[in-house]
Amino acid sequence: MGTLVEEIFSYKLGRPVEQGETVVTEVDHVMSHDTTTPLAMQAFRKLSKLTGGKVFDKERAHLVFDHIIPASTIAAATLQRDIRGFAKEQDINILQEGICHQVLPEKGFVTPGSIIVGADSHSCSYGAFGAFGTGMGSTDIGVAYATGRSWFRVPATINVNMTGELPFGVFAKDVTLEMVRIIGVDGANYRALEYSGDLVESFSMSERFTFCNMAIEMGGKAGIVAADEKTVEYLRGRTDKEYPMISARNPKYERVVEIDASKLKPLVACPPDVNNVVPAEQVEHVKIDQVFLGTCTNGRLDDLEIAANILRGKHIHPEIRMVIIPASREIYLEAMRRGYLEIFAQAGASVGTPGCGPCIGRHFGVLAPGERALTTMNRNFTGRMGDPTAEIYLGSPATVAATALTGHITDPRNIL
Ligand SMILES: CC(C)[C@H](C(=O)O)[C@@H](O)C(=O)O
Ligand code: SF4
């Protein structure tokens, strides 16, 4: 009996588990990427005398190249060379086809009821599939690579109940920004966010992904939705694994947050905090130098489709740059088949190789001093995309595409 997270841990441990307990348990999958693997490798190697020097299971240990791919500096290339050496030694296949959080679900690794730890803070995204996913430091991940186990203090849960129909021009990203506005950037510290309600049920896997992904922007340990027929449908053909359909049973939530989406307008998070959220129409005067559509938050097919519908047959404003990066190769290929990539190229956008792109300011669209970007990212922290005096605004794919056409922040309802 308990919250979705308590039920997952109870299932895993084969006994009732309650929030606040510290438990050690097997994990289903472990992940690190090109930026975090080097430190995880160090921790792993320190343990090798105890563990025999091999990862716990090479089919469940995942090394992803996504943050700076292809490498943009000699330092990045050197680290990637070292990781390739580690992968060869461990006989692990490096996943090099998009952002870790997008690729793991696509490969069918993220199943309901599973526990997945990743050396990346947005590992909470796996909650979209009814899994307990959480980010950990590289040392903990190194230990998990060696032992297949990890420790957890089972978090208390905040229930976010989303209801109402989305008004015209309002998308899952806007609902997510409204949630961060209400809860605040530390309002869910070490809590799980369990999402429920008619709206959550009506959302696609991709839309669920967006608000699970941003649980960490409120300090959340996990963001999770109970698996349903949409989850099963997504996983069909991606995995043969049998998985439990777990849901909350008589849960005791620490807090319930109600969001009625029917009252929302398109929203924008202004720098430098994700909860600095205002209606897009209030900041339409802000001139933008670069827009970026992509990332683990909003780089999926439905996001690209929204932008393609706005950009079709049009050209972006002459004083703006537009970067578009599909979150994975699977998405890239489908966007190509559907003609979206051609629409983007004709509109004057730069379309990049699947991966994180400029999300952490390392390549493919770094900002100059004083520049402003509007992006579909999850974070608008100072200095994240380049120079510390550059500013980052966050919005939905529709707001980003509308802004690309005008050169200043634009409420997409004026363009759609
Ligand atoms: C580089 C990595 C450690 C980082 C994270 O953990 O989130 C990055 O993915 C981010 O989004 O800021
Ligand atoms: S796309 Fe951005 S937020 Fe997502 S994992 Fe990459 S750097 Fe982090």
Image (cartoon, rainbow, N blue to C red):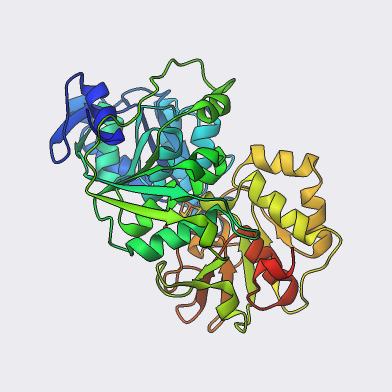
Question: Residue 283: image x %, image y %?
Answer: 57, 80
Question: Residue 89: image x %, image y %?
Answer: 41, 29
Q: Nearer the viewer, residue 38 or 145?
A: 145
Question: Which residue is painted at 76% across and 75% down in the image?
Answer: 317
Taking the image as shown, residue 296 lies to the left or right of residue 217, namely: right
**Quarter of the image holding residue 249?**
top left
Q: Nearer the viewer, residue 284 or 319?
A: 284
Q: Which quarter of the rendering shows the C terminus? A: bottom right
Taking the image as shown, residue 118 lies to the left or right of residue 328, namely: left
Q: Is residue 107 at least partly visible in the picture?
A: yes
Question: Which residue is painted at 68% across and 71% down in the image?
Answer: 403
Question: Which residue is painted at 55% across and 32% down in the image?
Answer: 106
Question: Residue 282: image x %, image y %?
Answer: 56, 79
Q: Nearer the viewer, residue 320 or 183?
A: 183
Q: Which quarter of the rendering shows the N terminus? A: top left
Q: Is residue 65 at least partly visible in the picture?
A: no
Question: Which residue is painted at 44% across and 27% down in the image?
Answer: 111
**Quarter of the image holding residue 275?**
bottom left
**Tally of numbered discs:** 0
**Quarter of the image holding residue 85?**
top left
Q: Is residue 40 above or below residue 57?
A: below
Q: Is residue 40 above or below residue 51?
A: below
Looking at this view, name the residue that lies furthest to the right. Answer: 313
